[in-house]
Every structure is written in C-alpha cells, then in structure tokens.
Amino acid sequence: MTECKAHAICCRSLSKSFGETPVLRSLNLCVDRGELVCLLGPSGCGKTTLLRCIAGFEHPGAGSIQIGGKTVAGAGLATPAAPEARRVGVVFQEAALFPHLSVLGNVAFGLSQGRGLLSRLGRGPGRAERARAREMLDLVGLADKADRRPGELSGGEQQRVALARALAPEPEVVLLDEPFANLDRSLRLTLRREVRDALKACGATAILVTHDQDEAFTMADRVGVMLDGEIAQIEPPERIYDHPADTRVASMVGRGALLDASVEDGGLVCCGLGRVSADGIGEACAGAGCSVFVRPEGLRLNPEGCPRSVAGRVVRVEYAGDHRLVTVDIGNGAAIPVKVDPNLRVSVGTEVGVEVVGPVRVVRGVKPPSPVTVSAKRTADAGRRDR
Amino acid sequence: MDTGGAAVVRGGGLGGIAPGRARRAPIMLLIAASVVGVLAALPVVYLFVRALEAGGGELAETLRRPGLLVLVLRTAALAGVVAGASVAIAFVLAVLTAATDLPLRRLSSVVSVLPLAVPCYVGASAVVGLSGPGGVLEGMGTARGFWAAAVVLTLFVFPLAYLPLRASISRVDPRLVDAARSLGESGLGATLRVILAWSWPACVGGGVLVGLYTLGEFGAVTMLRCDTLTAVIYEQYRSSFSRTGAAVSSLLLVVLVLALLGVGGLLRRRGKWSSARGSSRGGVTLRLGAWRWPAFALVMLIGAGPVLLVVLTLLSWLGYEGGAVGVGGGLWAGAATSASVAIAAGVACVLMTAPAAVLAARYPGRVSGLVERAVSTGFALPGIVVALGLAFFALRATPFVYQTWAMVIAAFVVLFAAQSLMALRASLERSPVRLEEAARTLGRGPVGAFVGVTLPGLAPGIGAAWVLVTLSAMKELPAMLLLSPAGSVSLAELVWSSTREAMFASAAAPGLALIGVSAGLVWLVAMREGLTR
Ligand SMILES: Nc1ncnc2c1ncn2[C@@H]1O[C@H](COP(=O)(O)OP(=O)(O)O)[C@@H](O)[C@H]1O
Ligand SMILES: [Mg+2]
C-alpha cells in the first residue's frame, strides 16, 4: 500500500451496506494530488454514500480509506477517524451555509481549529483568519459580498461561498456532491467553469459527484463512471467516450449503437452493420461472440442502395441545432443512431443506407437487451435498475 | 455530445437520506432523555401502585361510596358538554375568520383566542362575585351548578379548539369546493360540507383538548359549586383520612381521560379526508355580503365580551374595601412566589426536555417514542392527579422533598414538558443536520458543532419553550394547592381562596395580574399560529 503515499486519497476494496442492501461493492478509487475527478453515475448507485464514507459520516463495512497518506478508516484502524480529524472539505448540494453567520464568518468558520471551544465562541475570527477568508472570497469572486447573510445570496453565490468555506482550511481533498443540481441550467454552465478554475487555482484535490455527463466531461481531469456501487472505468473523458471499457459504460455515456458481433480473422468483426474492422478485439473478446459499439458520428447516411452500406429505414429524426440525429432501423430490431448535417432533410420512413466511417470498438460484457439504441431514456432505466 | 445522463432522476445530495437512520444514539443522550420520560410516567404509575396496595376490600368500599357514580357521570357530562359547545363555537369562528371575507380578519382572529387570557378560575370568580349579594346579577338566580360551570368553561376554553380548527380550515383545498360544486351542490352548501369534512380531524382534536382540560379543571368548578372528581380528590387528600380514596378517585379520573382519548380516536377514524394534504396556497373565501358586519359583531361579542366583562368587574372590585389589601403585601408576595416558581419550572422543563428533543429529532427510534409517549401522558393528565401521584411518591420514597418547591417544579415539568418538547423538537428539526456535518468537516467535534452551529438557530425555539412553560405554570392552581410548602401563597391560590371566602375584593388584584400573564401567553400563541400576520 506504499504507492498510496503519492495519492491525496485512496480507497481500497471499500464496501458498505445498509442493512441487507449492498451499496458500495469493493470499490477502488485513488486520486492524485491536485487532480479533479468527477464521478458520473445514475441516481442511487452509491455516489453520495462513497463521499459520506470518505468524509467520515458513514463507516465502511470493509476496506480502507487513506487521506493524505494517513489511514482514516479500515486497515487495522480500531475506530474510524472522526470527520473533524480528516482534513476533508465538503460542498453539499444545498450549500448548507450557517444562517447565523455572515458570508465572511462562514468562510472563516473552519480556520479557528487550534483554539478552544470557549475562545472560539467568545471572539469572532481573528485578523489572520479574516485575511485568509477574504482571500478565498476573492478567489470565488465574492469579495464584495463578505458582510452579507447567506440568505441574501443567490443559489450560485451560495455554492461559491460553500466552496470558499471548504477550501479555506486547505483540506487534503474537497468533496462536492452534485453541487449544481439545484441550480438552473445557464447558471450551471458558468459555475462549472468558475468552480474548476477556483479548485485549480488552489491546487486542490477534488472529487465531484454528478449524474450529468456534460458536467463530468467538461470539468474533470479524469471521469470515473460509477455503476452499482463500483467504479466501472476511470480515465480521462476522451478515453471514456472513445474507449468505453464495457457495455454498461458504453450505454451510460453518450449515444451510440451496441451490436452483437462475431470475430473473424484479420481484425474484422461481423455485425449488423456488415463486416467491419474493429479495435480492441484481443483485449475485450475471449470467445467468438462479443459486442461492438459505434458512435453516431462514426456512421454516415447514404442514399438507398449505395455500396458498402447496410439498408435500413428511418424511424426517428431529432433536430439538435448543430446536428441532426437520425435513427435507422436496420432489421432485427436494431435501431442505429446516425449523426448527420443539420441541413440534411430526412423524413421518417425513408429507405436509406448506413455506412461505417469511424472506429468500431469491441467492448466487454454482454449487449444490454433491446432496444439497442442507447439514449437518455435508457440511461435513466439503467439508473433505476441499479437501485 | 448529448446530455444522456441528465435525464436521470435527481439524487438526494450528500446526506439527502436521513443520516440518523443507520446511526445509534450515544448512550449518555439516551439516559439523559429518559429522565424526563421516567418523571412523567411516575405519578400515574405510582397512583396505580398505591391503589392496588390498598387491597380489594378497601378498593371496593371506596368505589361503592355513595354519590361516586353521580360524580363520575357529572364529570364526564361536563367534559362532553363543554367539548361539544366549544367545538361548535370554535367551528363558527374559524369559518368566519379563515374562510370568509370578514372585515378586520387579523383582529378577529386574535379576538377569537383572547378568552384564553382569562384563567377559568378568575372568570368563575368574577361570575360568582357578580351573582352574589350586591352583585349586578343578583336576583337573576344563582349562577351556580352544572350549567353555570359549563357556560363559564366553554366561554373561556373554546379557543383551545379554535386554534387547530382555524389552522386546518385555512388550508382547505379550494379545488375540492370546485369539485363539489361541479357535482351540483350550491355554493354555500358545498363549501360548508367540504370544510366540515376537511376539518373533521381538527374538530375531534380540538374537542379532545377541551375535554381533557375540563376533566382536570379544579378552580372554576369548585367555585361554581359543580363538584367534579377533582374537587373530591382534593377533599379526600386534604382530609387525609382517606388517602387511598384520593388515589382511587384519581385513577377514576385517569380512566375518564383514557375514555376520552379513546372516543377521540374512534371519532377521528370516521373522518373521510383525514389524510388529505393541505394545499400550499390553500383556503376558500365565502362571500358574506350584507352579513359581513353582523358576523364581525358576533365574533367580537363571543371573543371579547366575556373577557371585558371579567376585566371590568375585577377593576371595579379594586375600588372596594379590601381591594387595597389585595394590592398590598399579599399580592406582591404572591406575585413573587408565582413568578419565581414559574421561571424555575420553565428553566427546568427546557433543560430536562432538551436531551429528549435531540433524541427525537436526530435519533428517532423506540426509546424516543417511549419518552414522547410518557411526556404526552403527563400533558393529558389533570394537574391534581399529577400532584397527588408525586405527593404519594415523595411521602414514601423521598420524604425530604415533600412540601418543598422541588415538588412543585417537578409537577410543572410533568404537566408542561410536552409543550417544551414539541417546541424544541420542531426547531431542531428545522435546523438541518447538514449544517452540523459541514461544521464537522471544518474541524469541530460533535459538541463543538452543536454549540457553534445548531444552538444559535435554536435560540428562538428555546425561548418559546421557556415562555410557554413559564406562563402556563403561573396559572396552574391544583398542583400549587397540593404541593406548595406551607405558608406560601401564589397568585392562583390567592384568587381561589379569596373567592371561596367571598372576599371578592381581594381576588381582584391577583386575578388581574393572572390575566396579564395569560395575555402574554395568548400573544405568543397567536404569533406562532400566524394570527397576527
Ligand atoms: N442511511 C441510509 N439508510 C438506508 N439506505 C440508504 C442510506 N443511505 C443511502 N441508502 C441507499 O443506498 C443507495 C445509494 O444511495 P446514494 O449513495 O445516496 O446514491 P446516489 O448519491 O448515487 O444517488 C440507495 O439505494 C439508497 O436508498
Ligand atoms: Mg446522491
């Protein structure tokens, strides 16, 4: 376990059940110093539970947690360390600012740890503490709101104060649990950028939990896809998108078509889209049968009867501004999403051809039951199944 | 890229799931919380022990005492009549003030709870004086007996039923009225039927509250010569020959309390919409038209009339011979006694119920449920029963506290802990656990987090609990009569003894002082119920 000294936080074989229900299943997660990891997973997959275990509000049933090289739970430790002894900052979904303190008082709250209880009650924050608190407020762009009460701030401002409060004592790691979930969409977009900038400016290590794929992809250094109490894949966003580790990750992240395939010689697979060359046959495929995955932008729509394409019929057309997503039924109940130019007019019922132009990946695991198209709705279903 | 994941159902947030669920309460907290539960259960348990000890023969003899049955029936009948009449009055006033375009609605609402400012025995004292020799009502027949007591009690306690009724009626879902009308009922009929069905649980709850109060009422009924079980218990205890008799009579009263609660439970189950949720922007408004001002006059007459009558009577007595005496030394001593005991009782109550409130709000479970049940039993019990139970217990087990202020304060804690527990618990539940967790991650220990973050938010709740208990304790008569150290006289006792001896003039000043205290209580309640907004 020596390699964990290099990590800001390291969870090993973490398990946790509530009663009979297992919520975390032997989960492993290591985060480098200064890294921002986003955990992406459907509701109920155990994200919050994981963060609560790290923060010390819940105690894992098995496995160990190390923070800053120090074991705080498991691994022979008699009692898990108390939350206040872990040097972990937390930003809750609903900000949870102290209503009786000013914005500055909130940010300075965690800075008076050395002092005794009575002296902390008696005096407000000292000079050095105020200076540090102002510095943090500066960082989140709220220096002018220092004397306000939390109730007088907007939702986005409250979250920024919460972040400043969590960062002020220079914690080993900051945990953010769906910090933008209660905000409206446009605010979320700006706040993502601001929060990432603030975290990077402090060089803070952070774990941000979300069920929003855009949020995870735009903010993270590495995205961890969490499914069913485990981390199914943890890699940079590009890798997750281009090389999903298994069918579950493939169906969870972005859109695409998952198809049954059989392996042939010369790096070829045979699937509903014809005989195509595919990556990763060796790694992911043990026997002859496997699943392949292709993104909508890896496919092209051709007129009916074109060579090298598979015939099908358009069953749905979705307009998305910068592109159109055309779903083509190629038989056997396989509905394939194809990304096309927004100016291309196609109507439902048209007979077309689908050609593979981009990479086809072989992925581990069995193909999820039909429909094959992986869409937002399917992701939600997956979330419900997971619970 | 597509926001595939965004459609997923929203998660609960860090700690979105009640974090107390899987956690066990600290053992010290369990012990501290149980103290008040044990204390609250003590009187009634001990009364049982005491009555059983007496043995079958003595028990049977006591129960066969001539007149006992009449007494029980009278007590039950009085509770029934007062409860029924109070609910009827309260329903009318609540509809008028919460579901119509009555003018000056805020004033009307506050006036509807104003009668609570007159302790029943003060009201009774005024009525007795007025109908006595030289009184205004002299010759109008004697204002004594069952019906006099029923009228006086109803006039001064119906607001206990008004409060829950008003709260319920102001949340009536207007869509239900629309639905009833669309099914062909006339506007007024539909509205009233919907309101009645909707507020049925509140009607029952209010009736039970008034009934409980009436069962335990002591001062007014003895002054008005309508002896109920409480009067007999008092006599039996004082005469000290038949202490067992007092215990048995107390248990009979407890049986009546249980019967009342049982009847309440039965009636409540008959409600059709008892589980319906109120609408947030709820409320219906009936147009009164030409009846607006007559209705307003009715509210003023019922709410303010009796109160004014009593206050003016007492004021006029102040000028009489002897009134001045009342104002003198006796009054100040009484006020000092009442105030200091009540203040101490308030502090004791808050301190003792605080652990139970933390337990109930943060670690709900079997123990917290038991403690809450014991504490609400104390609330339902008549003051005289609690006092008697504690007296018996102290005589036997801890004679050194018998007839000390500690006994009185313990009785007040048993009687009023429920109010304090509810107020504290409500404000604790409003203070999110998340705040404490945030404080923990910022380096505070469990106690530090509670003191630094939760406590500041609790201050108003603690204040409210303390004031509520203090003001209630000032008014309490039977516990004071039974338990106070020899030689001390509180305001409540002053009113009671002066009236009994027909020295009305000396009842005036303490009576007015008590009305002042109670007015503070009423104001608090009115503010909390949102009547002043
Ligand atoms: N305190 C608890 N008691 C019982 N079950 C819990 C508790 N906390 C969480 N769970 C269960 O654990 C599962 C994972 O919850 P959670 O970690 O909140 O998921 P997420 O944050 O990913 O939405 C859910 O099924 C939830 O019902
Ligand atoms: Mg969650």
Image: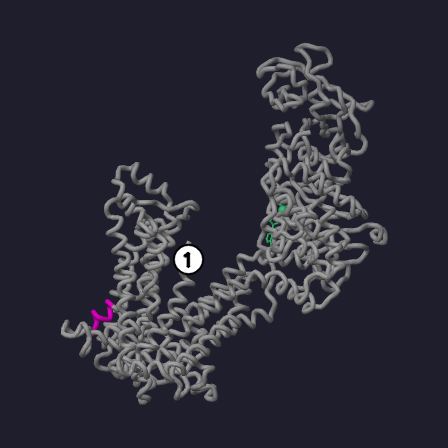
Can you give x and y, in whole percent of width and height, for residue A3 in the image? Answer: 85, 51
Span shown in magenta: B144-151
Q: Which residue is mark 1?
A: B529
**Which residue: 24% across, 48% down?**
B291
Describe residue A172's horizontal placement relative to residue B31 as left or right.
right
Report if residue B385 is visible in the image: yes
Describe residue A15's horizontal placement relative to residue B237 as left or right.
right
* Label 1, residues with CA under 10 Å away: few <14, some 14-19, many ≥20: some
Q: Is residue B147 magenta?
A: yes
Q: Is residue A245 magenta?
A: no
Describe residue B48's horizontal placement relative to residue B291 as left or right.
right
**Disc 1 chain ID:** B
Judging depth in this view, the residue of A30 and B217 nearest the camera is B217
Residue type indicated by callout 1: Glu
**Which residue: 25% across, 61% down?**
B85
**Label 1's element?**
loop
Can you give x and y, in whole percent of width and height, for residue A208 in the image? Answer: 70, 45
The quadrant where residue A337 appears: top right
Judging depth in this view, the residue of B479 and B489 nearest the camera is B489
Can you give x and y, in whole percent of width and height, for residue A89 in the image? Answer: 71, 53
| Vertical side of B79 occupied by B495: above or below | below
**Which residue: 75% across, 54% down?**
A132
Report if residue B47 is visible in the image: no
In this view, which residue lies farthest toward the front?
Answer: B319
User: What's the colour scheme?
Assistant: one colour
| Vertical side of A203 occupied by A246: above or below | above
Judging depth in this view, the residue of A227 and B456 nearest the camera is B456
